[in-house]
Image (cartoon, rainbow, N blue to C red):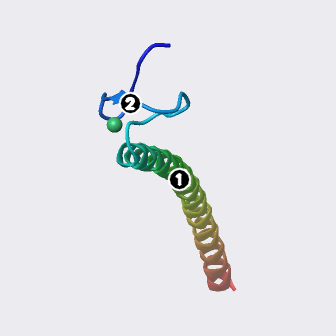
């Protein structure tokens, strides 16, 4: 059986064949950095979701603004028409 080396510090691993790390410190360090990597990935996914929501909201507000400006235009036309018609009376 070949000698195993610790993936954290590169030192030779002695002991049971299923032992991966040379020490508890290296195992803890490895597991912590794994958790950090997972958290970073979660953060990235969260940011992507947040970005999508922001884009949707922006599209929504654009649509809302367009609708509002269209409605106000219609109201202006209507009020002009009623003004003109009331003047003619
Ligand atoms: Zn080590």
Q: In the rendered view, would you say 34 is above or below 10?
A: below
Q: Give the class, few, some or many, for how many residues have Cα within 10 Å of label 1's Cα (few <14, many ≥20).
A: few
* Image depth: mark 1 or mark 2 in front: 2
Residue 68 position in % (x across, y down): 59, 67
Query: What residue is rendered at 42% in x and 44% in y?
Result: 27
What number is the disc on residue 7?
2
The residue wearing badge 1 is 46
Ligand 1 occupies quarter:
top left
Query: What residue is rendered at 50% in x and 34% in y?
Result: 19
Distance of label 1 from label 2 (alpha carbons): 30 Å
Residue 37 position in % (x across, y down): 44, 44
Is residue 79 found left or right of 34 in the rendered image? right
- The quadrant in which residue 5 appears is top left
Image quadrant containing the C terminus: bottom right
Observer-nearest of 84 and 34: 34
From the Cβ of disc 2, is ligand 1 less than 8 Å away? Answer: yes
Q: In the rendered view, would you say 22 is above or below 25?
A: above
Residue 16 position in % (x across, y down): 52, 32
């Amino acid at each position: 059986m070949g000698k195993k080396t610790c993936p954290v510090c590169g030192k030779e691993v002695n002991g049971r064949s299923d032992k991966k790390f040379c020490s508890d410190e290296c195992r803890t360090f490895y597991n912590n950095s794994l958790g950090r990597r997972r958290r970073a990935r979660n953060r990235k996914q969260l940011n992507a979701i947040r970005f999508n929501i922001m884009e949707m909201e922006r599209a929504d507000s654009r649509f809302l603004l367009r609708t509002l400006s269209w409605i106000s235009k219609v109201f202006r036309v209507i009020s002009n028409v009623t003004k003109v018609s009331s003047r003619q009376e």
